[in-house]
Amino acid sequence: MSEKALAYLTENRNRLLQKLNDFLSIPSVSTDSVHKEDVRKAANFLENYLTDTGFENVHLVETKKHPIVYAEYMMAEPDAPTVLIYGHYDVQPVDPIELWESDPFQPEVRNGRLYARGSSDDKGQVFMHLAVFEAIMKTEGKLPLNVKVCLEGEEEIGSENLYTMLQEKRDLFQADFAVISDSGMVAKNQPTILYGLKGFTGIEITVSGPDHDLHSGMYGGAVRNPIMALSHILASMKNENEVVTVDGFYDGVEDLTDEERELIDQVPSEDFVQATGITETVSEEGYTAKEHTMVRPTFEVNGIYGGYQGEGTKTIIPTSATAKITCRLVPGQDPISVQQALESHVHKVAPKGVTVEVKKEKLSAKAYKVEPNHPLIQKAAESYTKAFEKETVYVRMGGSIPVVEWIEDIYNIPIVLLGFGTPEDRLHSPNESFPLDSYDKGMETLVYYWNEVIKK
């Protein structure tokens, strides 16, 4: 199977790349109502491609906003497994447009990279799966396993309706395992198994004092300053060793095993200083910066505001101050329990003379982790190595993909994260791009993988 499919991909490379360019040319920006019909146009593109490839029951699952593209191929051998392929066809806004070197919806190849919004996140990676299925169908007449496809149009706006659809239509999306290509490799041409993702939760703290801004000379010393009170609260939540000091924050957190430390040590180290412009790294006491970002929970203040922001000085005691906080979580932590622990701590340490309100982030997700030695993971690693001719490394990522936790929660199936992006892809930024090396070798990896999955 592999040789014929790979030959087909090589012979049809230019045609398939043009088809991908047609897909990328559709401005399917889900957050902007101006592009509502463009989002549907992208869904129709996928619907037509899946139908032409030979999938059955291809249709749009309507939601309260943008549709989910569904398709299935259920004609494999009786004992063949069923895989659920998840991806998304919506893209981020392009702003600021003036920083793009080429039109974000007119794909252009420069220096071995395909530049366009969505080229890496996630249209390019979605298309790779469909092109591989086309190659296998056209050369073999059938797929080696059963396939269900779920491609959503709301990932970039928080997947507002996906969880409900997955629950309500359990039988439609039920599978033996899932494969998601919406992530990347730790370096270009470095095959990477992503076997864990962090969870996510957050709160917003607003400290209120006087009912209007006060003259700091007339009232300073008699009235608590909300900014100072908020600063006191924030400073009490994490110490100088990067250890979170909130009671209950670390409840359930798994210890880092020696085996995982060895896996992490094999991952090429990012030069944090060069990449970020900082002077030195900081990490939780007892852990390296690489270990902390991958496998330990984090607490970060994402924004803080209050009082006078203009030029010069305005001598006031402001009426209020606000801070936005998010936490990345690891296996064993419950997002709701973490929110409650943060809220309790805030009220416990809040100084007198102010009132404190805590708003809890609505979008939360648990962390996800699959055992690196799971057979489906091992087959993915072998396929990566065969295509890229380099040993595969294993990582847990500091980012969060809520759909991963949802699929595990609803279906209780293993999830294989087969990502082909690179750190240089500029996701969500101007000049997003995808290396054609990853495009070609990624499809080669997928061909090998589907062949390996069906082996006993």
Image (cartoon, rainbow, N blue to C red):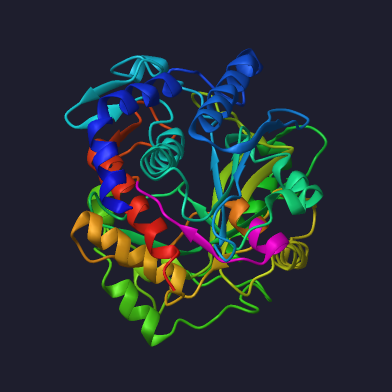
Residue 192 appears left or right of 212: left
At x 56%, y 30%, the residue is 51
Q: Quadrant of the C terminus?
A: bottom left
At x 66%, y 52%, the residue is 230
> Was residue 111 drawn as part of the magenta stretch in this picture?
no
Residue segment shown in magenta: 407-420
Quadrant location of residue 344? bottom right
The relative height of residue 182 versus residue 386 in the rendered view (above or below) is above
Quadrant location of residue 264? bottom left
The relative height of residue 59 versus residue 268 in the rendered view (above or below) is above
Residue 116 point in image, percent of width and height? 36, 24
Q: Nearer the viewer, residue 453 or 33?
A: 453
Residue 242 appears left or right of 59: left
At x 16%, y 29%, the residue is 111
Can I make out residue 293 in this image?
no
* Residue positioned most to the bottom: 258
Quadrant location of residue 231? bottom right
> Was residue 411 drawn as part of the magenta stretch in this picture?
yes
Residue 233 point in image, percent of width and height? 65, 59
Residue 217 point in image, percent of width and height? 66, 37
At x 24%, y 63%, the residue is 268
Residue 159 point in image, percent of width and height? 66, 40
Q: Nearer the viewer, residue 121 or 167?
A: 167
Can I make out residue 127 in this image?
yes
